[in-house]
Image (tube, grey):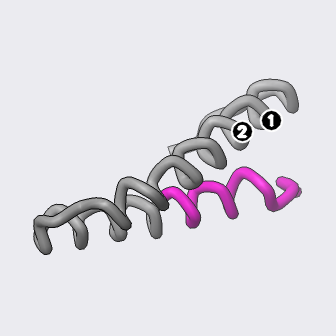
């Protein structure tokens, strides 16, 4: 899928993703359910990959 975004839109998405990654740290730490703990870690990994896509300049 191809999606065109302005530089401001990319910056906004990048900031939102960064905030969610930061919020997941304590949530992961305080989760008692092993299954939910793993689900949150996988979500964090996916968000980090998305953040990397938003950080790399498009050519």
Label 1 to label 2: alpha-carbon separation: 6 Å
Tell me: residue 33, above or below residue 13: below
Tell me: 9 left or right of 29.
right
Q: Is residue 55 magenta?
A: yes
Q: What span is in magenta?
A: 47-59
Pointer 2 local density, CA inside 10 Å: few below 14, some 14–19, many at least 20: some
Residue found 72% across the figure and 51% down from its top: 54
Q: Residue at x 69, y 63 (%)?
A: 52
Q: Which residue is mark 1?
A: 11
Mark 1 or mark 2, which is nearer to you? 2
Residue 48 position, x and y percent, is 57, 63
Label 1 with label 2: CB-CB less than 8 Å: yes
Secondary structure at numbered mark 2 = helix
Would you identify the image quadrant in which residue 46 lies? Answer: bottom left
How many residues crowd around disc 1 within 10 Å: few (fewer than 14), some, or many (20 or more)?
A: some
- Rendered image: mark on residue 55: none
- Residue 39 placement, left or right of 35: right
Per the image, label 1 sits on a secondary structure element best described as helix
- Image coordinates of residue 40 in percent, x first then y, are 31, 61
Q: Residue at x 48, y 61 (%)?
A: 25
Q: Is residue 28 above or below residue 15?
A: below
Give the labeled residue for mark 2: 15
- Residue 41, position in %: x, y? 36, 69
**In the displayed structure image, the side of residue 8 where residue 17 appears, left or right:** left
In this rendering, the answer to whether 26 lies above or below 11 is: below
Magenta stretch: dominant secondary structure: helix
Query: In percent of the image, x 58 and y 53: which residue is there?
Result: 22
**Residue 16: % across, % down:** 63, 36
Quadrant for the C terminus, please.
bottom right
Q: Nearer the viewer, residue 23 or 46?
A: 23
């Amino acid at each position: 899928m191809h999606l065109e975004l302005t530089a401001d839109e990319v910056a906004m998405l990048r900031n939102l993703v960064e905030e969610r990654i930061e919020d997941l740290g304590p949530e992961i730490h305080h989760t008692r359910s092993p299954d939910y703990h793993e689900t949150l870690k996988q979500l964090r990994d996916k968000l980090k990959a998305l953040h990397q896509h938003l950080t790399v300049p498009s050519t």
